[in-house]
Image (spheres, helix red, strand yellow):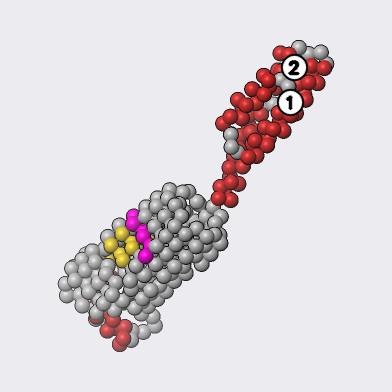
Amino acid sequence: MNQKLTNYLNGVFTPYDGVKSVSELKADLHSDLQERYAELKTEGKDDATAFHMTIESIGDIEQTILEVANLSRSLERQVVTNFSASYLPKSDLAGVIAHKGKFAASALRGSDFTGADLTGSTFASSDVGEAIFDHANLTDCNLSAIDLKDSSFHKSILVRTNISKSGLDGAKFIDVKLTDVQLTMTDLRKTIFDRCTFNGVDFKYSDLRGVRFDEQTFIGVKFDKSALNEVSFKGAILKNVSFLSGFSLSKKYYRAIRTICFEGAMMDKLTYAALKGMDADLSKVTVI
């Protein structure tokens, strides 16, 4: 065995230690090169000539290793992000990167996703109650129809996130900007929203009775066909916000609109006009 040849291979492969497919490539290549070196020596070549001819015979091996390593790491990432049907309660997943991760039908109650990048991930049919999503990136995530009771979303990134039909009793959304988020057909009576900005959020058919949205901002938001009794928008900003009831305004819907508190709120002329037509109490509203 030529030790110089072994040392050469060790040096080339050092940056890729731990990558399984690269390790396998190294073992195969080591065996082949030792055979080639032995053949050249048998042909009468001196040590230096045999070594250089052996190395030249494999061409640009570093590029080949790089391609194999990149492919292997890509496949490993795909495996790591599939946690479907897993039992992972109270798991420490803070800071993980799991784009398009699969967490479907999993037990994740109490797990910590603080600061995680979960872009495009799905949690369908999972138990994610008491989970921590503080500062997590939940862009394009599917969190619909799951248990999110007592979960935390402090400064989370919520863009095109689907949270419709989920259990959100005790869930806290604090200092969050919700952009194009789906919160339809959801019971939000015990959900806490504090210092949030709602941009393009859809609350259609949701139960919002008694929810406090004081001093928060609503732009292009839809509250159509929602239960709105005793909702508070004290000091809130409302622009292009829709409160449509459906085909006709029933007496029941009129009564619900009258119970909404808009004290100190600021709203654009169109939102103001629509609510005025529903007989809402706008006596302490500022039109902007």
Residue 80, given in percent of the width and then of the height, sits at 55, 50
Residue 155 located within the stretch drawn in magenta: yes
Give the residue pinned by disc 2.
50
Q: Of the residues shown, which amino acid type is indicated by label 1? A: Leu
Q: Which mark is drawn over residue 139?
A: none
Mark 1–mark 2 Cα distance, whole angstroms, equals: 11 Å
Residue topped by disc 1:
33
**Quick check: can you spot residue 104?**
no
Circle 2 — which element? helix
Residue type beneath disc 2 = Ala
* Residue at figure coordinates x 28%, y 75% from the top left: 210
Residue 181 image-quadrant placement: bottom left
Q: Is residue 91 left or right of residue 214?
A: right
Q: Is residue 1 visible?
A: yes
**Which range is magenta?**
150-156
Q: Position of residue 211 (x, y in %)?
A: 29, 72
> Is 160 positioned to the left or the right of 28 in the image?
left
Residue 141 falls inside the magenta stretch: no
Question: In the rendered view, would you say 49 is above or below 270?
Answer: above
Residue 180 on image: x %, y %: 40, 62
Neighbour tally class for label 2: few under 14, some 14-19, many 20 plus, Cα within 10 Å: many
Name the secondary structure under disc 1: helix
Residue 271 percent across, percent down from the top left: 28, 71
For the residue carrying disc 1, how many other residues have a C-alpha within 10 Å: few (<14), some (14-19), or many (20+)? many
Residue under the point 68% across and 37% down: 24
